[in-house]
Amino acid sequence: MDTFFISHGSPTLSIDERMPARQFLMSWRSKFLSTDPKAILMVSAHWDKPELAVNSINGPNNTIHDFYGFPKPMYEIKYSAPGAPELANRVKELLKKAGFGKVEEDKKRGLDHGAWVPLMFMYPEANIPVCQLSVQSDKDGTYHYNVGKALSSLREEGVLIVGSGSATHNLRLLGPDHVPPPSWAVNFDKWLTESLLNGRHEDVKHYEEKGPAAKTAHPEPEHYYPLLVALGAAGEDAKAELIHHSWSNSSLSYSSYKFQAA
């Protein structure tokens, strides 16, 4: 099974029917993955911890509304997909085997908006078990690539691995939708796509050195690292494909990618 990175962008994606990324996600089954997975492992930018952690939920996942000052209808959305405790245990097992040590198991945490916003369009029935894996912003890109690499065998077990973050993410430099993307965002977004499509994975891992205006595009790394987990999980020499590209808030890129094992 292929792995994917989805730029989930603004949480208003959940209610704004004008956003092109919404239509992209709604076409998921027809265009990208016609066979439903047994379970989904979501690596979301919005679960950032000092150590690796999985959520292990028996029963339905809670819907975490981890955003502030948005329209009331967004706080009324529920995405109660079942938890995936067996997958959580398998993730822990694989990471331990690969030398990552202890992986925390959270039996209460549900799905943050980096997980449920895209999933509510990809799998609106909310009937596929979902487990989340955290990122660690105090680690580097190679570390997160290797986390994904350790989990690559899940692809053969019917598990869909999705990294959910953003190709560009600088909340201080957002603007109105009608304003064209600034050069720093365009240049980083273009570099990322070209690097992935041309197999320059080492450059992608070391984006802060190789990518133009990287510190402006990603002042913090948590929205970038899910991409590296998904890329690593596709295995060595994985082939990348750009499957969606759009903008919102002037500088927020929704570039999303499929990673196919060689």
Image: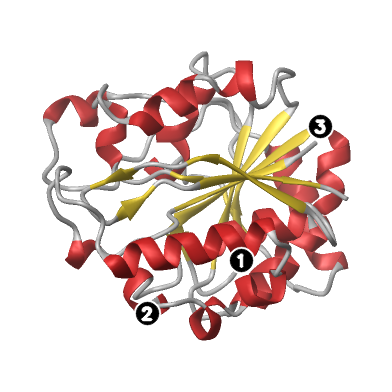
**Residue contact between numbered discs 1 and 3, judged by CB atoms under 8 Å:** no
Between the C-alphas of marks 1 and 3, the distance is 22 Å
Please tell me whether residue 76 is drawn above or below residue 233 in the rendered image. above
Between the C-alphas of marks 1 and 2, the distance is 24 Å
Mark 1 or 3: the one toward you: 3
Please tell me whether residue 159 is drawn above or below residue 47 in the rendered image. above
The residue beneath circle 2 is 215
> With 17 as the anchor, is 118 left or right in this view?
right
Mark 2 or 3: the one toward you: 2
Quarter where residue 214 is shown: bottom left
Mark 1 or 2: the one toward you: 2
| Most foreground residue, 51 or 161 | 161
Q: Is residue 120 visible?
A: no
Q: Amino acid at mark 1?
A: Leu
Q: 10 Å neighbourhood of mark 2: few (<14), some, or many (≥20)?
A: some
The residue beneath circle 1 is 52
Q: Position of residue 228 (x, y in %)?
A: 63, 63
Indicate which disc, 2 or 3, sits on the residue closer to the N terminus. 3
> With 26 as the anchor, is 203 left or right in this view?
right
Q: Position of residue 117 (x, y in %)?
A: 40, 34
**Residue contact between numbered discs 2 and 3, judged by CB atoms under 8 Å:** no
Please tell me whether residue 77 is drawn above or below residue 85 in the rendered image. above
* Image quarter (top left, top right, bottom left or bottom right) of the N terminus: top right
Residue 158's label in the rendered image is: 3
Helix, strand or loop at label 1? It is loop
Q: Amino acid at mark 3?
A: Gly
Q: Position of residue 88 (x, y in %)?
A: 70, 46
Indicate which disc, 1 or 2, sits on the residue closer to the N terminus. 1
Q: Position of residue 106 (x, y in %)?
A: 55, 52
Q: 10 Å neighbourhood of mark 3: few (<14), some, or many (≥20)?
A: some
Between the C-alphas of marks 2 and 3, the distance is 36 Å
Quarter where residue 62 is shown: top left
